[in-house]
Image (cartoon, helix red, strand yellow):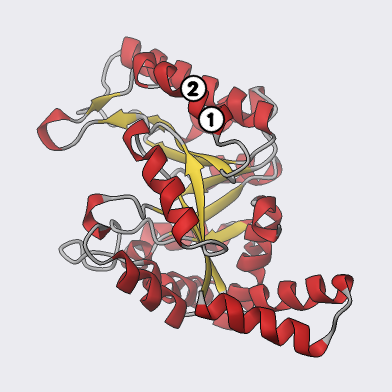
Amino acid sequence: MKTSGLITHFIYKFTQKRAQNIFIYTNIMARGFIDCHCHLSANEFTQDIDDVLLRAKMAGVKALVAVTEGASEFEKVIQLSKTYPGFVFPCFGIHPLQGSGQDLHSVKIQDLEPFLPLFQKYRADIIAVGEIGLDFTPWFANTTQEHDEQIKVFIKQLEISKELDLPVNVHSRSAAKVTIATMKELGIRQALLHNFAGKPSVAMEGVQAGFCFSFPPAVSKNEQRAKLIRQIPLEHICLETDSPALGIDKHVRNEPGNIMICCEYIAKVKGISSDVVMEVTTQNALRLFSKLKS
């Protein structure tokens, strides 16, 4: 790709030593954004993915962590990573809610088990296990049986992440405390809790466990989330868009190119510059998703 070629030329021009190459590449990454949670395999992007990714690059995005919600997306996200190498980085995961629209329902172990071999088949390609987690929203999962089944699916995928030595990209709606407790019990060390909306006290349990938290553009409309962002140390925060959802206008498709919105909002809440937020969150992402460096 053209951008990748320019970066390679820039590095080669200044040095031929491999160690210095890595140093320069890291500095280049540090001056751009990493969208740590987006849904590039969503149907909303099918018609114009090239334009979407071009706009993301123009907005300063250097890498996109592309999560899945269901097994039907696995092959698609792998293909996207092959089409846009060094820019789109795939994850595999089964979301706690399956289906869509009127058919949205709590996940069952049968939604995961037939596809377990794909985690092994593509272990060299995926950089994290996600989007996984728990969603105890009452109108989707209001019984103990549904909660237990979600936890079963969640634990199985946490075990896969440990087996593959990969971080997890986690959803935790109406279940923040149980989600963090489950990860801690299984000895998870590398985790991103995306669009986190739990209590600050629960978030701090995650911080103490070494977990990171990310926030999409939509949080800029939520004063309650500002209190949470204020309390979580910047060293534990990453940026995300969760696109095509959770933009500033729920009626308009969100894109990775909107990453600056959440960056500027976090900077405003914390009273620091957006450059500092960009640099620190990018380093956090590189530390969390270690395959981004390779």
Q: Which mark is residue 119?
A: 1
Residue 111 rendering spot, x and y as whole percentages: 35, 21
Q: Residue furthest top?
A: 145
Where residue 238 appears, as percent x and y from the top left, is 56, 60
Q: Are marks 2 and 1 in contact (CB under 8 Å)?
A: yes
**Screen quadrant of the C terminus:** bottom right
Image spot of residue 155 (x, y percent): 53, 21
| Mark 1: amino acid | Phe
Query: Going 80% across and 89% down the picture, which residue do you hit?
Result: 14
Let me know if residue 201 appears in the view: no
Q: Residue at x 64, y 57 (%)?
A: 292
The amino acid marked with disc number 2 is Leu
Look at the numbered disc 1 and give the secondary structure of its residue: helix
In the rendered view, tell whether residue 224 sits above or below residue 268: above
Q: Residue 40 location in percent, x, y?
A: 36, 55
Which residue matches tag 2?
116
Q: Does 157 appear above or below 47?
A: above
